């Protein structure tokens, strides 16, 4: 089991409460082949808690391309996800931050939640899960 020091937790919290430098970006796109042989993450919004804040992540798929964006619970604007990759039941993405944070998640069997990890460069790995938003 990973135990994060209070210093590491504070470092992550500082990153996540500051707005990205490129606010106002609506979305970004990344190609990924859709796997139709099994249930995929699909489009729509997912909501999860990370460092005492709620985060909403939204994925869409149009013209063979995936795009994504996110909003913090205290935010008013959507911001682009970067490095978005979708493959079957798995999704990974990042967003503009320092240190870099990478989410690696997988759709659970019920199709209603994603679970996996958030890796913070130089700090550590923490569990993360999100439920499909209504």
Image: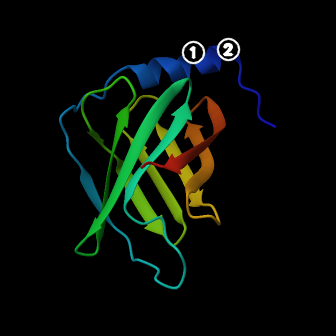
* Residue 3 appears left or right of 122: right
Q: Can you tell which mark lies on residue 85?
A: none
Q: How crowded is mark 1: few (under 14 residues within 10 Å), some or many (20 or more)?
A: few
Camera-side residue of 127 and 82 = 127
The image shows residue 14, relative to residue 91, as above or below, that is above
Horizontal arrangement in the rendering, residue 109 relative to residue 72 (left or right): right
Element at label 1: helix
Splitting the image into 4 quarters, where does residue 31 fall?
bottom left
- Residue at the (28%, 69%) spot, across then down: 65
Q: Where is residue 91 in the image (x, y as percent from the top left)?
A: 49, 59
User: Where residue 35 sits in the image (x, y, percent)?
Assistant: 47, 80
Q: Estimate the spatial distance between the alpha carbons at disc 2 and disc 1, rounded to whole Å.
A: 6 Å
Report the front residue among 73 and 81: 73
Choose top left, top right, bottom left or bottom right for residue 97: top left
Q: Residue furthest front?
A: 134
Asked if labels 1 and 2 touch by Cβ distance under 8 angstroms, the answer is yes
Vertical placement of residue 28 versus 3, above or below: below
Q: In this view, does 48 lie to the left or right of 31?
A: right
Residue shown at 57% from the left, 41% from the top: 118
Q: In which quarter of the image is residue 1?
A: top right
Q: Mark 1 = which residue? A: 10
Give the residue at x 42% y 66%: 42
Q: Which mark is residue 6?
A: 2
Toward the right, the furthest residue is 1
């Amino acid at each position: 089991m990973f135990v994060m020091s209070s210093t590491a937790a504070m470092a992550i919290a500082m990153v996540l409460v500051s707005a990205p430098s490129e606010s106002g970006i609506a979305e970004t796109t990344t190609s990924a082949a859709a796997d139709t042989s099994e249930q995929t993450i699909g489009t729509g919004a997912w909501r999860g808690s990370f460092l005492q804040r709620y985060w909403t992540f939204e994925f869409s798929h149009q013209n063979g391309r995936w795009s994504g964006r996110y909003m913090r619970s205290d935010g008013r604007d959507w911001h682009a996800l970067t490095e978005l990759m979708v493959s079957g039941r798995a999704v990974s993405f990042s967003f503009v931050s320092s240190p870099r944070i990478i989410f690696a998640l997988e759709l659970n069997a019920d199709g209603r939640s994603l679970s996996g990890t958030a890796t913070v460069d130089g700090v550590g790995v923490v569990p993360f899960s999100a439920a499909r938003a209504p």
